[in-house]
Image (tube, rainbow, N blue to C red):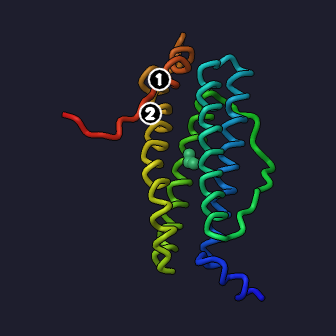
Amino acid sequence: MKDLLRLRTSLTEEIEKVLNDQIKMEAEASAMYLAMSAWCDRNGFDFSAGYFKKQSDEEREHMLRLFKYVSDMGGRAISPAITNTQIEYDTFKGVFEQALQQEIAVTQSFNRIADRCQKSKDYVTFSFIQWFLKEQIEEEYVARRALELFDVIGEEGTGLYEIDKRVPKITYEDTYED
Ligand code: FEO
């Protein structure tokens, strides 16, 4: 029966599982960023609250993009249950440290998926995830730049206020121009 079901899709069970795991990871990231947005809002960091809300929306888009792919390929996409989202942070900087760690973890996860795709010769999925691999350059860049603001501007005086104002203005240029 299991094999019969698999006739409907070229996704192996292993690839379907890693994609569903990634769907969950993106949903967790979306929930994490929304909680960060709320924390920033509660603590008077209005610009960062808006920035994290936007990040949360982007992560949901990532989740839906993966979800659609699994469904389109005839696989079983699973709507994940998200629990234990961290809602409190000790410091403003701690929020950005966590955000960068999360993005690095996502990059590593997609690298592992790419590796699995190659090992199982699933070049359709391998091709599909190229978008995500490229997206991670920007995601990591922005998270790293945001965290660097704490060293560049400093946290004394109106430092945190300045950092908050600058966070949404960080932009990533993906073309090289001299
Ligand atoms: Fe969906 Fe921020 O990676």
Which secondary structure, mark 1? helix
Q: Residues within 10 Å of mark 2 (few under 14, many from 20)?
A: some
Please determine whether, in this image, residue 140 is positioned above or below residue 94: below
> Residue 2's x, y, as percent?
75, 86
Amino acid at circle 1: Lys
Question: Nearest the camera: 130 or 34?
Answer: 130
Mark 1 vs mark 2, CA separation in Å: 11 Å
Quarter of the image for residue 151 reads top left
Picture quarter containing residue 145? top left
Q: Which circle's residue, 1 or 2, is located before the other in the chain?
A: 2
Which residue appears at 65% of the width and 29% of the height? 91
Q: Nearer the viewer, residue 97 or 111?
A: 111
The correct choice, above or below, for 57 with respect to 163 in the image is: below
Which residue is labeled 1 in the image? 169
Q: Amino acid at mark 2?
A: Arg
Residue at the (62%, 34%) spot, across then down: 95
Query: Does 3 appear above or below 61?
Result: below
Residue at horizontal 47 percent and vertical 67 percent from the top: 126
Disc 2 on helix, strand or loop? helix
Q: Quadrant of the C terminus?
A: top left
Percent position of residue 153, x then y: 45, 20
Q: Position of residue 90 (x, y in %)?
A: 69, 32
Residue behind mark 2: 145
- Residue that appears at 63% across and 59% down: 22
Would residue 101 be visible to someone looking at this image? no
Q: Is residue 8 above or below residue 35?
A: below
